[in-house]
Amino acid sequence: MNQMKPKMLLGSALAFIALMAFVPWSASAEDAFPWLRLGAGAQSIGVGGAVTATVDDATATVWNPAGLASVKNTTFTVSTFNKGFDARQSFLGIAHNLGGGSIGLAVSGVTVDDLEHRDANDIRRGTFRANSNAVSLSYGHMFGNIGIGIGVGVLTDVYSLDAERVNGVRGADIGIIGRRTHTTPSGKEIPVFTYGLAVRNLGSSYSGNHSESAVPMLVDAGVAFKLPRKGAGVTFSFDVEHEFAELVESTTSARIGAEYMISKRFAIRGGARGSQDHQSLFGGFGVNVGALQIDYALQDAPASRLMESGTTHHVSMSYSY
């Protein structure tokens, strides 16, 4: 009976996610908050964002809430990237284990300085700062080898010299991460194959400075394979994402990444993200010193609606206790 409960729960959750993903949803005409798709955490960015099946820290509030089910301690994560001198994104998250599962709280945002403001007569009235933020609350619980997570989020936005702050609902997230493990001669179980599915921004509601815009629903599916080695290991991951938005460019993209743990303290990473219209390359490394994890990622990409062309540097730091 105990073995049947996780299977029944998994089947019910998969059926619900499939229903949410494939019922006729009205796609938004635009993407009001495209920066939400950039993700968070240099560790995840370094593998091209192909982490739907592997994320296991506070950034799971952004990628897949089911990843919180694997958090064993209390973990703080701070992440940022700069695009030139006037655009930057930041992320601050905490995940805390409650026993059978973990709760996560995250605040992320993007700020662009020195935007030019002109009136109806095209007269320059000065510059202003555009600022958008998202607050997410998520929970993940482990049932055997299956993690299930849910989350909700709210949005705030200011995009004009005269505009007031506008609030909205980012919507709900639901996700699953399952794993197959290998038992070592010492009896330790090591995940060698993981799979994940996440539906994000369900039921978003926003109206404000972005006319006829919304936060589109996203569906992500991913798998990962780990080749364990003594004191090291290699993980290969692959994701597919579809965005429910009526855009001229492709709304389906793929992400692929690899992480090589040279030792327990140092890892190198690489990845790629691409669609029919845009491709990006990623690379990075991570250093672990006790409870402190420091990660760096480099992104090289052409111009897209997510960001301008050029190189972007991502830095994050996590501390667990």
Image: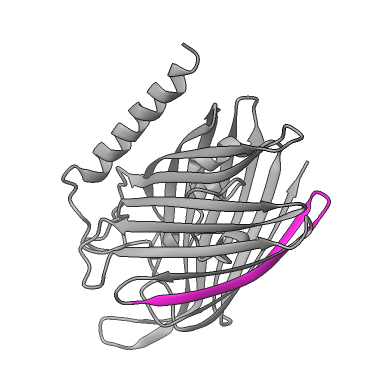
Residue 213 placement: quadrant: bottom left
Do we see residue 29 in this rendering? yes
Measuring 32% from the left and 38% from the top, which residue is drawn there?
A: 17
In the rendered view, would you say 274 is above or below 72? below
Locate residue 109, reporting x and y percent.
Answer: 52, 60
Locate residue 274, reporting x and y percent.
Answer: 39, 71
Quadrant (top left/top right/bottom left/bottom right) for the C terminus: top right
Locate residue 184, reporting x and y percent.
Answer: 70, 38
Q: Given the current orientation, which residue lies at the most extreme front position?
A: 185
Do we see residue 297 in this rendering? no
Q: Given the current orientation, which residue lies at the most extreme top position?
A: 1
Measuring 28% from the left and 54% from the top, which residue is drawn there?
A: 207
Measuring 38% from the left and 22% from the top, which residue is drawn there?
A: 8
Tell me how the rendering is colored: one colour
Total numbered badges shown on the rendered structure: 0
In the rendered view, would you say 181 is above or below 142? below
Q: Considering the whole magenta stretch, tell me its main secondary structure.
A: strand
Residue sitting nearer the eye, 124 or 190: 190
In the rendered view, would you say 69 is above or below 171? above
Residue sitting nearer the eye, 22 or 227: 227
Give the extent of the magenta segment: 278-295
Position of 80 with respect to 180 (left or right) is: right
Q: Is residue 273 within the magenta segment?
A: no
Locate residue 103, reporting x and y percent.
Answer: 58, 35
Measuring 58% from the left and 66% from the top, which residue is drawn there?
A: 46
Position of 64 with respect to 213 (left or right) is: right
Q: Given the current orientation, which residue lies at the most extreme bottom position?
A: 123
Q: Is residue 283 within the magenta segment?
A: yes
